[in-house]
Amino acid sequence: MNKTTAILGTLAALIIGFFIGKATVSDQPSDKPGPALKSAAPDPSVERFKVPVGNAAVTGAQGAKVTIIEFSDYQCPFCSRVEPTIDQIKRTYAKDVRVAFKHNPLPFHPQAAPASRAAMAAREQGDDKFWAYHRKLFEGQQTLDDQHFEQWARELGLNVDKWKNDMAQNRARYDQQIQADQAEAAKYGARGTPAFFINGRPLSGAQPFDAFQKVIDEEIGVAEKALRAGAKPESLYATLIQNAKDGAAAPEAPKPPPFQLPDPKIVYKVPTGNSPQKGPAGAKVTIIEFSDFQCPFCSRVVPTIKKLHETYPNDVRVIFKHNPLSFHEDANLAAQATIAAEEQGKFWEMHDKLFENQRALERASLDKYAQEIGLDMTRFKADLDTNRYKGDVEADFKYGSSLPGGGMGTPTFFINGKKIAGAYPFEKFDEMIKAALAESEKAPPTKKRR
């Protein structure tokens, strides 16, 4: 083959490749705006950001009237909580909404970035495989580790050898994509997870369906107006955001004090009072727990506490105190429901029911759980109707807030008076309990009064 023939062959291949590439992506909505259409421009008084879809995984109708861009974290409990809402949106607006997913693993969630890499490796075998794997990650949020990542790849029928090879060979590229998504999240003011942009309009947090529905319905009207004005369906999203803000102003906030773990030498004198307890009264180790039935971290630590009871049946007792946080709207009444159950000798049965059904703690559900555990329903309903135990809940909350460094998060524990805050794994509690048992062995015996 002479040199001229080789050059012509290369050019032909490039031209053919170009048109194949165009054909491959031609069915995807474009991020490039069509001609500027003043009459198609949305109301400028509505805050809107120019968040690109880029190469994010997308599900939904081609040329949809509404584009939702989600910044999420596979280890974030609030991100998993909003997934059923996203599913409801897809069902309700099947032809009008598409959803694009971007990765924003938070630094204090160590398994979030590995989960994102696993999802991106699944995407190498098709967008449908990405979304199926995406669902597996949120369903298995409590077990995000290498063993389960591979197990889910097998369950979904992926080519596991290819998936494992992509995980190993493409890590740098996946990390680059994660960092790019994180930079976008910061640029557009999405500092927590989950964060959404609905046709560029920001919506933060695990909001209920109604909150999404309001914005989506408004945006469908905006999109239809733009289409009537001549906007092209394939470039509709880009047309709607072409005059949007290209970034959010960074908030000016004072620097927080440096983080410090509680001083392990400090022992708090937290009274047990008449709070419900599980374990022998004469146990060598007393754990006082301040908790919130609507807090996802509190539910996450429930299996750990159960394992402590099984491991130290004679040496550990757990005392439960209420700390319903103000932004958990159902937590206070749920706490009252457990006290009402306690008055009928079934605190722990109600405690377990509430944590097992944490997403349904409204009044009707509380009545349902009370009936399931066999409470006197007339008495239970009267207790809740009159807020009979509201004062008891507030007393626990105020006491917890009055401790040094008060205003506690949930869950917070005091193990023989030593503080540990957060849903730590069993090993951390086990370490502290063993230390407490060793200290109890050294302590001089208590003199009995005559």
Image (cartoon, grey):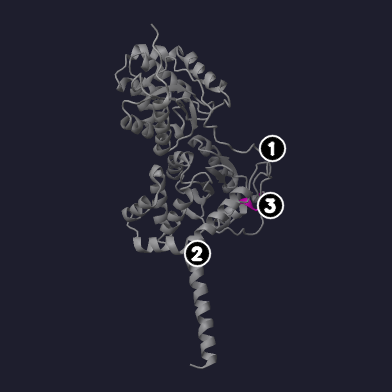
On the image, the x and y values in percent for residue 154 come to: 32, 55
Q: In the rendered structure, which segment of residues is drawn in magenta?
A: 240-244
172, above or below 111, in the image: below
Q: Nearer the viewer, residue 246 or 355?
A: 355
**Amino acid under disc 2:** Val
Query: Of the residues under marks 1 and 2, which one precedes in the sequence?
Result: 2
The image shows residue 37 at horizontal and vertical percentages of 66, 54
Per the image, the residue denoted by label 3 is 38
**Secondary structure of residue under mark 3:** helix
Which residue lies under the disc numbered 1? 254
- For image coordinates 56% across by 40% down, the residue present is 204
Q: Is residue 432 above or below residue 288?
A: below
- Dot 3: within a 10 Å radius of its alpha carbon, few (fewer than 14), some, or many (20 or more) residues? few
Q: Are marks 1 and 2 in contact (CB under 8 Å)?
A: no
Quadrant of the drawing holding the C terminus? top left
- Element under label 1? loop
